[in-house]
Amino acid sequence: MYYANLQDSGVMAKKLQELGAKPLKMPSTIKRAATSVIADLKWPDEVDYEEDAENFLKEAEKAEKSIMKDEKVEVEVDRYANGRKHMKVVVDDELGPYDLLMTKVDIKKGPYGGNLFYKM
């Protein structure tokens, strides 16, 4: 009850009393400061969070698509690749450049195996 009485709204204290808690008189030596300024603000009646989130995502998607259309994505082949002059990076119109890193473990090589890495 002590902490419930410290709330500005008093909702928790009321609920606890409804459930059988004994009311607690707060000592007069304790000066209680406001726990929140939010309780004093005027809020709109209802906010549709689902619709708000959907609208935000649609706007972000439109902005991203317009940026992607405006700039031509051109990526260079990895400078460590063997035979670079015969390679090119594939770029999808919607997804952008492809990037792939594969790992192969050769279990026949030594007691712990050997790792081979392929970067595409």
Image (tube, helix red, strand yellow):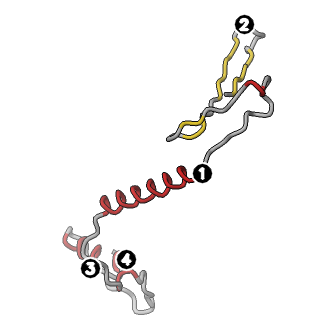
Please report whichever mark, 4 or 2, sits nearer to the chain's N-terminal start.
Answer: 4
Measured as percent of width and height from the top left, residue 65 is found at 48, 51
Label of residue 23 in the image: 3
Q: Nearer the viewer, mark 4 or mark 1?
A: 1
Q: Residue type at mark 3? A: Pro
Depth check, front residue: 40 or 83 = 83
Cβ atoms at labels 3 and 1 below 8 Å apart: no
Depth check, front residue: 95 or 93 = 93
Q: Residue type at mark 4? A: Tyr
Cβ atoms at labels 1 and 2 below 8 Å apart: no
The residue at the point 45 percent across, 92 percent down is 29
Label of residue 21 in the image: none
Measured as percent of width and height from the top left, residue 81 is found at 77, 27
Quarter the N terminus occupies? bottom left
Find the distance from the CA under tag 4 to the CA under tag 1. Answer: 61 Å
Mark 3 lies on a secondary structure that is: loop
Tell me the residue that label 4 is attached to.
Answer: 2
Find the distance from the CA under tag 3 to the CA under tag 1. Answer: 67 Å
Q: Nearer the viewer, mark 4 or mark 2?
A: 2
Tell me the residue that label 2 is attached to.
Answer: 108
Tell me the residue that label 1 is attached to.
Answer: 71
Cβ atoms at labels 3 and 2 below 8 Å apart: no
Q: Residues within 10 Å of mark 4 (few under 14, many from 20)?
A: few
The residue at the point 74 percent across, 24 percent down is 86
Depth check, front residue: 47 or 38 = 47
Mark 4 lies on a secondary structure that is: helix
Measured as percent of width and height from the top left, residue 44 is found at 28, 77
Please report whichever mark, 4 or 1, sits nearer to the chain's N-terminal start.
Answer: 4
Mark 2 lies on a secondary structure that is: loop
The residue at the point 36 percent across, 86 percent down is 26
